[in-house]
Image: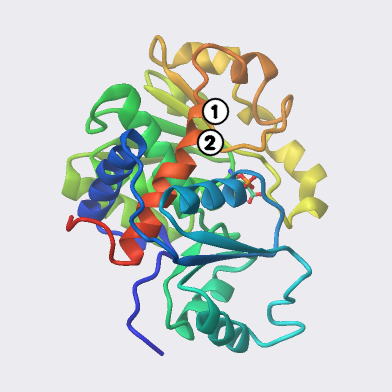
Amino acid sequence: MTTRRHLLSSADLTPREIAGLLAFAAKLKAEPRRLVPGKQLALLFEKPSLRTRVSFQVAMRHLGGETIYLAPQEVGLGEREAIKDVSRVLARYVDIVAVRTYGQVIVEEYASYSSIPVINALTNEEHPCQALADLLTLQEKWGSLAGRTIAFIGDGNNVARSLVLTAAALGMHVRIATPRGYWLPDWVMEEASRRARETGGSFTPLVDPAEAARGADALYTDVWTSMGQEREAERRRIDFAGYQLNRQLLELAAPGAFVMHDLPAHRGEEITDEVIESPQSIVFDQAENRVWAQAAVVAFLLGAAPEF
Ligand code: CP
Ligand code: NVA
């Protein structure tokens, strides 16, 4: 066991660190720097990925380091080999690891045995790198985030959890509309409320998507069925029927409100083709900013970032 710093949950970062990471990411984007020359990042992935994998690889190249990708089925985390053994072996080869897996408990157990920093590259419960890239994107658009309203419409899933924890730390007004039974866990709601109180923002959990969308500066949605939940897809299509991000919902938001999605998107389910293709959509800016948010995180965890 070590006291090594990891990024497993968005709650691991203080509001000050989140703001610092966003400012640092913006600087790296404007002027990439070889801050971790020769360092090796392992990408240990148990689920498919386009954005997370490629953006970490590109980020590491900008930083002067290298990556090793381990695809689903290759390592057999906890099946071919005990999590604690994989963790200790990889730490002998590389300097930092990003893990994409199922339960948050897996990444927590992995990190508890790791002498190198561990980054959550998506679990069933959280997606902290996504949230940093999303807030970096909004900060670029608006200059400042405090006082702006963001509304997440859909499942209280990994993306929603990390988004509310991160946005509430930046003085934003955060709303989320989920169907009954798909809420965020209590601890996330309590932590988001606590952070919002500290930063002058607010956190409002709702059931009605229209109430969440009304007057909001950005509307965010994600798939109704996440990776690993495929067997629930039919049930979820019924439960989320009124939660589509479509033109009617967008018209309730502030004029020019941004449309956000972490991708991959299921057009015709959680979002219409018309809305995701509209000029208000910033989904590809979000995807691009994964590179810079993650470059900042890697440099920070390797001790190569400025003091925040
Ligand atoms: N948004 C995101 O994490 O995409 P991938 O699953 O393709 O990495
Ligand atoms: N909630 C989605 C996010 C994909 C990036 C999933 O977990 O499948």
Q: Is residue 86 left or right of residue 302?
A: right
Q: Of the numbered discs in the image, which one, if any, rests on residue 168?
A: none
Q: Secondary structure at mark 1?
A: helix
In this rendering, the answer to whether 242 lies above or below 156 is above
Label 1 Cα neighbours within 10 Å, binned few <14 / some 14-19 / many ≥20? few
User: Residue 138's spot in the image, x, y percent?
Assistant: 36, 30
Quadrant (top left, top right, bottom left, bottom right) of the C terminus = bottom left
In this rendering, the answer to whether 81 lies above or below 126 is below
Label 2 Cα neighbours within 10 Å, binned few <14 / some 14-19 / many ≥20? many
**Is the CB–ligand 1 distance for label 2 below 8 Å?**
yes
Q: Of the numbered discs in the image, which one, if any, rests on residue 284?
A: 1
| Residue 24 seen by the camera | yes
| Residue 157 seen by the camera | no
Would you name the residue on which mark 2 appears?
Answer: 287
Whether the residues at callouts 2 and 1 have beta carbons within 8 Å, the answer is yes
Mark 2: amino acid: Ala
Q: Nearer the viewer, residue 180 or 193?
A: 193
Q: Residue at x 79, y 51 (%)?
A: 230
Q: Residue at x 47, y 43 (%)?
A: 291
User: Residue 124's spot in the image, x, y percent?
Assistant: 60, 59
User: Residue 166's spot in the image, x, y percent?
Assistant: 35, 48
Mark 1: amino acid: Phe
User: Residue 244's spot in the image, x, y percent?
Assistant: 63, 26
Q: Nearer the viewer, residue 275 or 305?
A: 305
